[in-house]
Structure formats: structure tokens, C-alpha cells
Image (cartoon, rainbow, N blue to C red):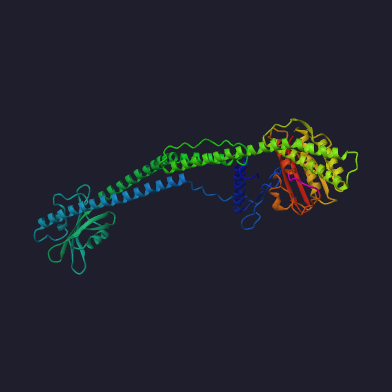
Amino acid sequence: MTHPGAPGYAAAARRAASERAQATDAAAGGSAAGTGEPGASVGSSTAASAGGGGSADGGSSGAPSTPARRRAPRTLRRTLVVVLGALVVLASIIVGVVSTAVLHGQLVARVDGQLQQATERAARAVGGDLPLPPQAAEELLRLPGQPVGTIVALVTSEQERVVAATASIDEDGDIVELSPSAQAALASVPADREPVTIDLDGLGDYRAVGVPFVEDFAYVVAFPLTDVNATTTQLAVTIAIVALAATLAALALGALIVGRALRPLDRVTETATLVSELPLARGDVELPDEVPVDDERTEVGRLATSFNRMLGHVAASLSAREQSERKVRRFVADASHELRTPLASIRGYSELTRLHGGELPPDVVHALGRIESESLRMTELVEDLLLLARLDEGRELRREPVDLTRLVIDAVGDAQVAAPDHAWRVDVPDDEVTVTGDASRLHQAVANLLANARVHTPEGTEVVVRVERLPAASDAPSPGRVRVTVTDDGPGIDPALRASLFERFARGDASRSRRAGSTGLGLAIVRAVVQAHRGTVDVESEPGRTAFAVELPA
């Protein structure tokens, strides 16, 4: 995986997180699945393997287990819409309960008023003595103004309250007798002139009032609550239907309003994602356009404004950094170019002095030799700096077919002459492996890798250089890639140095021999040349094995 800010880093990180989450869910469901993580080598491929999962009780059923479902993310939009719907439902419940209770109470109070009028009419009608039952109850029911379903019961208070006579008016206006259970319920009504609600078997709820009469007698008048209950139920159903429709409308409208209100947040997220995938580490970076702000006074508007201000600061910082880097590169290129001539003159004068016919003192000869060697080393350093400066400026390299097989064989031959105490081995295909690029720069990159293995490993180290073709994907239009690997069995690279190994002026630590001078630019040149050819370079190292892998488009 590339470093943060490199192209595709954010997308690769999201894919890796998604793969880890899927592997966790599969393990929780009973199946074992492993997903390879990106390795140290850029060119290495990710491997994935899946194993069969057994049953939860350890049986051999072999049935595939169902992975655990992941809960939907609690986004801000979802939370706001759910809270809005919950508030509408809560308000509807409160309104419905209060409205139904108030209406039911008012209707029951109206029935109580009718009961009061009915008892007053009964009192005026009977006056004094009442005929014996059952004619007494029937006489009260025949009074004018009695609604359908009215019940009149004559109750005696001797020993226990017993209904002496009952009667009821049906829908046809006929007087009918009540069942024993209904009579028992009427007999339980206290004669205190206070209305109570009773449940009569087979007839439903009634509102009844008991009135004391002469001696041991009382009469009970009851009105049905059927209409009251029906009206209350109809109101509750109507409120429930209206509340459901209002909740659905509120959810739809709320989702629309919340989505429109949070749209600037989506634009901020999209812009931030684009910025996170830009290569901000180097080069001239063009940031996305600013997020449009509808109203700066709102919370979302203030966030978008702050984000735009941050984008402006980032753009200004990147522009200043790029200008500074260009100045540094231009200075390095100009200084390197200007230093080539005086260094060549110093080396020429030292060689001319050594060609002098006269005898020179030994110390002078030694000093001239040192001047010549140091000027040569300084010239190589200047050439390396000039090359890096040109590559940083993005100057185009030559594009021509290069036989990588022949190039590697020649480079290894030169390294074998320079270090015969190492064991050099070449593993290349029988036919040509051709890439498009600059032959001299590619040769320099391979030679630097071989020089790195030669300088930083002890005598007797085996260095193997391998050239191989990597197969292209089945749906890829390109013909594949070519990999050049330089492997040695030396002491390895210190892990603390591995992160900055390809940086400029990075030097090996004390665990590796430094029998020859090093400028610390060799591997930096390797990376710059390979990247200029749209390739990648990486290293894997452990004690006893170090492998540098260069991949180039075939």
C-alpha cells in the first residue's frame, strides 16, 4: 500500500477495511475466511483463501452457514428522519388519547344528565305508593321520553338486595325481561343517586343510577353506552388513520427536507474524498472547486465555509511548497551544471601535473592523487544530483525498445569485474524481454542496485539477478509487466532504515560493511528512474535475504 497522499491510497484503505469486515462477519457466521493484506512489495499480489465452515455444534452437516448481518449505519440523515417520525407518532398518540378521553367523558356526562332527568320523571310519576312488581318496572318504562335500551329495575333491600322486577325496551318498543346475571349486576348498583358504569351480560356497558324509594325499595335506571363507545371507537380509529397518514407524509417530507438541508454535507464529503486521493506529497496539485454555500448563517453553511477556507489554505500551502521545490530543483540543476566545468578543470590539472617530466616528492604525488580521486567522486555526485533534478522537473526520457535481458547480463558482468569476491548469478529467460524506455537510465538503475549489493554485503555473498515476465490480468488491455529482482544473502537491512531507504542521502547503518564510499543517492536514482518509466520498486529484507524488486510495463 502506498503512503498517505499517494494516488489511490484512500480507495485502497477503504477496500482493505471492507475486506477485513467481511472476513470478520464470515468468521462470526461459522465459516473461516482469510484475506491477504498488502505486503511490503508493491508488486506483490494479494492472496485470498477461504475454508469450509463446520456446523456450530461441531457436526459434519456440511451445510453453509449464514454470515451475520451487519446493522445499517446510523447516518445523520437516517437519525433525523427517524427522530422526526417518532416525534410525529408521539404527538399523534398524545392527541389521540387526550381527544378520545375528553370526548368519552363528555358523552358519558351527557348520558348522566339524561339519567338524572329520567330519575326525576320516575319520581314525579310514582309519587307515593308504587304498585307491586313486576308492574312497577313496566310502569316506569312506559313513561314518555325513555330511549331504546332503557332498563328499569325495582330492587328490594330486605336481607340481600334482590331485583323484584326488571324491564327493558328493545328496538321495537317492546318490554322484555333481563337475564339473571344482568339482574344481579343491576342489584349491585348502590342507591346513592351517583351514576356508575356496569357491564350487563349480553347487553354491553350501561350507565346506571340507583334511587331510594319507600321503605325497603329502590329503583335503578340504566341507559346503554353503545352509542358512546361506538362514537369513541370511531374517533380513535379516525385519529389512528390520520396519524398514520401524517406520519408517512412527515417521513417522506422530512426525508426530502433533511436531504436538501444536508446536501452541502454530501458535497463536503465528496470534495474531502477527492482531496484525500490526490497525490499531495509532491508536484503541482490542482484541488477541487470549493463547495457552494447556500446560507453562511446556518450550521451546515458555516461548516462548508470553514471547509472552503481550509481548502484555500491547503491550496496556498501546496502552491508555496511547489514554488519552493522548483526553486530548489532549479538551484540544484544550475549549481550541478556550473560545478561540472571547475571539477573537470581540477581533475585535468591534477592529471597534467602527474604527467610532468620532473621528479615529484612522494607527498606531492599522494596529494595530487587524492585531489584527482576526490574531484572524480565529486563529479559523480554532481552528475547524480543533476540527473535527479532533471527527473524531478519531469523531463521526458528517451522512449525506445530496450532488451532488458541483455542489459541485465551486461550490468552483472560489470559488477562481477568490480567485485570478484562476490558470487554473481543471472536467471533470465531464453528469449528477449523487451520494455520501452531509456536504455542508459535503466542500465544505471540496475547498476546502482548491483552496486548497493556489492558495497553493503561482505565477501562471499551470493547475489542473484532474475528477470521474469508477470502475466497480465484476463481483462487487462496491457501485455503485462516485467520484474527484475536483485536478491542477496547478506545480513539484511535495519527495519528502522527501510522506510527511508529510497530517500536521498540515505546511508546504510553500521550492520553493513562500508568498504567503499557512498553518496546516498544510488537508490534514490533507482526510484526516480523507475517511476519515470511508470514502474515501481520495493524491497523485502530479513537477516539472510534482501530482495529489491523492480517492475516495469512490458
Residue with the most extreme bottom position? 159
* Image quadrant containing the N terminus: top right
Which residue is drawn at the image coordinates 34% and 43% (left, top)?
A: 242
Q: Nearer the viewer, residue 442 or 140?
A: 442
* Residue 428 visible in this rendered orientation of the protein: no
Percent position of residue 199, x then y: 27, 57
Residue with the most extreme left position? 128
Horizontal arrangement in the rendering, residue 60 relative to residue 482 (left or right): left
Percent position of residue 416, x then y: 86, 43
> What segment is highlighted magenta in the picture?
516-520
Q: Principal SS element in the magenta part?
A: loop
Q: How many marks?
A: 0
Percent position of residue 347, x then y: 81, 39
Q: Nearer the viewer, residue 271 or 442?
A: 442
* Residue 185 visible in this rendered orientation of the protein: yes
As drawn, 444 above or below 166: above
* Image quadrant containing the C terminus: top right
